[in-house]
Amino acid sequence: MVSSSVVSLVPAVVSAPDVGPCVPTPLIWPGCKDWIEGAVANDIPADASRLIDVFMGSGTVSLKLAERFPSVLMTDVNPDLVGFVRVALLDPEGLIAKASPLFVAGMNDGETYRRQRTLFNDGVGMRTPELFLYLNRHCYGGMIRYNKKGGFNTAAGNRKSSVFPKESIRGMAKRLPHAVVELADFRVTMEKAGAGDFVVADPPYLASTITYTAQGFGIKEHADLARAAEEAAARGATVVIFNHDTPLARQLYANASEVVSLSVRRKLGKHKKVPELKAVYRPCVQTPAVAPAFTVVGDCTPAANDSESCAEGFNVFGVIERPAVACAYESSTAKANATLWAHPVGKVWATGFDFAFSCGDFASATSLPHVGGVRTDSKSRAVEQAVTALLDELSARFPDLQRLSKGQATEVRALRKWLAEQLEKARAGGFEPLPAFTFIDLCAGVGGFHLGLSQAGGRCVLACEIDEHARQTYLANHPMEGVPFPSDITQLSAQDVPDHEVLAAGFPCQAFSIGGKKAGFAEARGQIIFHLFRIIEAKRPKVVLLENVKNFCSGEGGLWSRTLRQKLSGLGYAVSGKVFNAADFGTAQERERVFYVAYRLDAFPMVQRFSLPVGGGKWVSVADILEPNAPAGKHAASDITISPTLDKKSPLKRIGMLHGHRGQQARVYDPQGHATTLLAGQQSCGLYLVNGIPRQLTPRERARLQGFPDWFKPHPVKTHANKQFGNSVAVPVIAAFGTAFNQQFFSQAA
């Protein structure tokens, strides 16, 4: 066992960056502490180098104290609030542009407010920063209140006019250029506090009935906060906690260095003065002689005879040299990358991270899992610890982004954003193993089936794709080490196909498409389906998932569809098919495709019928997936001949046509509606009026229309990327099928 001593190092004093003048917060907040400066002026140590604003709320504490600290960490557990503050700091002008239509005449009445609140709660992609701002400034008293299901449920306020706080948004961004904003539980944030940190914690009051999150904040959480403050002070931090001055609060903070009663005005209750309690925990660093070999997180203490398993995988220096990768990141410019490790050690998990920048000062750091490090009781908690450690490293390396080059600052922000996403996923248990099934991905394209089925717990054991450019994109995005990747399915022998449980294929549609010659099985590409039948008959997968264009259902009097159903039925499968629209699964694209599911009757004798997945009917518009800095189009608004969509209920909101042009490529659409079906052609999905200028969609925007995440790397050549996303399946639809397979097949088979 390797021991280590814990040494506290007080950081050198660093001057605070130049910040803009103090401005009011853009949010209305009942507990806003406008008086914070005077209340804590004598508590801030002279050598304090970082402000940690634990329950950041409206951000007033950070706004008021920003100029006194070279670094600011703002955290909260409310994802809507965190999302708003992040966007306000990183893209204030973009936020202003999106929010301004919500602050116009006609948006103040209660009916409009309730409609916007329903959209915020129920619409996929609609929990946006701009809508959060609208609800905050139009609800009763600015109270951010949620029900147990996580729905925003504050009633409408009585507002005769809308005050749009655009200057406060701009001022907030100028005032806090050095702030890092994280979605984090207060316990995690408090664990980061140490020497040189000044922590302000303003939790929901003990007497409060307002639930700022679905989880609420009770007496246990208040007790945990008091205990965390003591531990942070022991590590060298100064912590100040505010609360309502009650006997219970004084009992909670009995171990504080100082407890003071203040008389302050609150924004609710007719602004009357009320007693406020301030508890101060001052540094009292204790250095233990020997630290434990592991820092234990969660209930993962090994049994007495489990010491050998806990050392499994460590070399003679106490390090795991090749740890298991939980997730990895590479920026769109390839100038930044990071890896989070979560390695199983016996019944627990060891954790670590790595990052490197190939720009600016080429900063990098590696912390392999080691015997003196953290171990957790689950993979998700291991990832959470790795994220926290890497965020700490980034904060230490880059305390002031204004001192970096524009390129490196952008890379740091992008990495922090990705880390925040992984933290949310880890907190939701998203890294725990799902019910696993194996699948093969035939006619694979760029891997829409691969990505969707993997999200549901599937593991790819073979992929097959003939297009060389699509193969390049596939290999750039999917883990294929040790996975066969043949190119030509017509030459693929069934003997070379590994055993698998699910066969997935989006077989070529050109022979069946209404836009083609409709030659069907008479065309070479139309005969690929018979090679699928050949492999299915030889390998006998438990489940088959096939996709094609809608016209496959009715072509040649229904011959194509009938052939598929009869062939699979004859092989011992129950077959069902249906046309699905990707827009029903949270995408901004009207894309109707037929899907056939076949399951082997002898493999699932207890399954009476397969229940096809059902979309949520959730609305996402093209405007929600647009890139903010995409190149403008070559046409002007004056080039459009107005000819709007006559059907007012249509999700496609056509504005008109370009002068002198014909066909789909000349149609101009309103981005507040859905996109037309993506096709392989460069101009096949029309143009969209963005900032007054009609333009085509970028490859990234096309990827988003198909449900690909932003970490997915499109082919570097635009024409290839557009073709590939036009040919792809919509990932959320495939993920829904994968989830249904788990629920109806593999959980029972297990």
Image (spheres, rainbow, N blue to C red):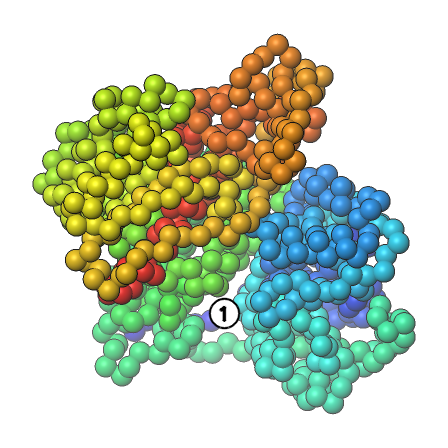
Pick the front one: 352 or 613:
613
- Residue 207 seen: yes
Is 29 on the left or on the right of 506, as rendered? right
Instruction: Give the residue drawn at x 70%, y 80%.
Output: 206
Check disc 1 and report its element: helix, strand or loop.
loop
Q: Position of residue 104 (x, y in %)?
A: 82, 44
Q: Amino acid at mark 1?
A: Val
Residue at the far front: name it.
557
Pick the front one: 80 or 247:
80
Pick the front one: 280 or 482:
482
Q: Position of residue 476 (x, y in %)?
A: 35, 36
For residue 166, above or below residue 285: above
Could you tell me how many numbered marks the image carries? 1
- Residue 456 seen: no
Q: Position of residue 657 (x, y in %)?
A: 63, 19
Residue at the far top: name it.
660
User: Badge 1: how crowded within 10 Å, few (<14), some, or many (20+)?
Assistant: few
Quadrant hosting residue 739? bottom left
Instruction: Give the residue drawn at x 70%, y 41%.
Output: 98
Pick the front one: 586 or 524:
524
Split into 4 quadrants, where in the image is the C terminus? bottom left
Split into 4 quadrants, where in the image is the N terminus? bottom left
Instruction: Give the residue drawn at x 21%, y 50%.
Output: 573
Check disc 1 and report the residue beneath it. 7
Instruction: Give the residue drawn at x 37%, y 71%.
Output: 377
